[in-house]
Amino acid sequence: MDHIPYTGLGGILVLVLDLWALISVLGARVSTGQKLLWVLLILLLPVLGFVVWLLAGPRSSSASA
């Protein structure tokens, strides 16, 4: 049987956190290239990408106001 890495409540939590990170990245005042790199990191490595974004990623322009 194939193992799915994110199931149930854990999968929903990862999805919600990644969506939050993606929305924040897309609303940030950084270059398109930087946005693309962050989006790819978050999509390709959902948990690690979120943690790296949380520690070092760009924030949305509304968060700094």
Image: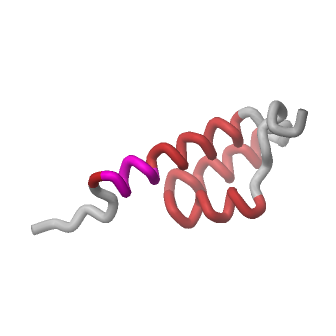
* Magenta-tinted stretch: 9-14
**View extreme (right): residue:** 65
Is 11 above or below relative to 64?
below
Query: Does residue 20 appear left or right of residue 29 in this picture?
Result: left
Residue 11 within the segment the image draws in magenta: yes
Q: Residue at x 78, y 38 (%)?
A: 60
Query: Does residue 36 appear left or right of residue 5 in this picture?
Result: right
Quarter occupied by residue 36: top right
Q: Residue at x 59, y 41 (%)?
A: 20
Residue 4 location in percent, x, y? Answer: 25, 62
Q: 3 or 39, which lies in front?
A: 3
Residue 40 location in percent, x, y? Answer: 58, 51
Residue 28 location in percent, x, y? Answer: 79, 38
Q: Residue at x 67, y 64 (%)?
A: 52
Identify the image quadrant of the N terminus. bottom left
Q: 9 or 51, which lies in front?
A: 9
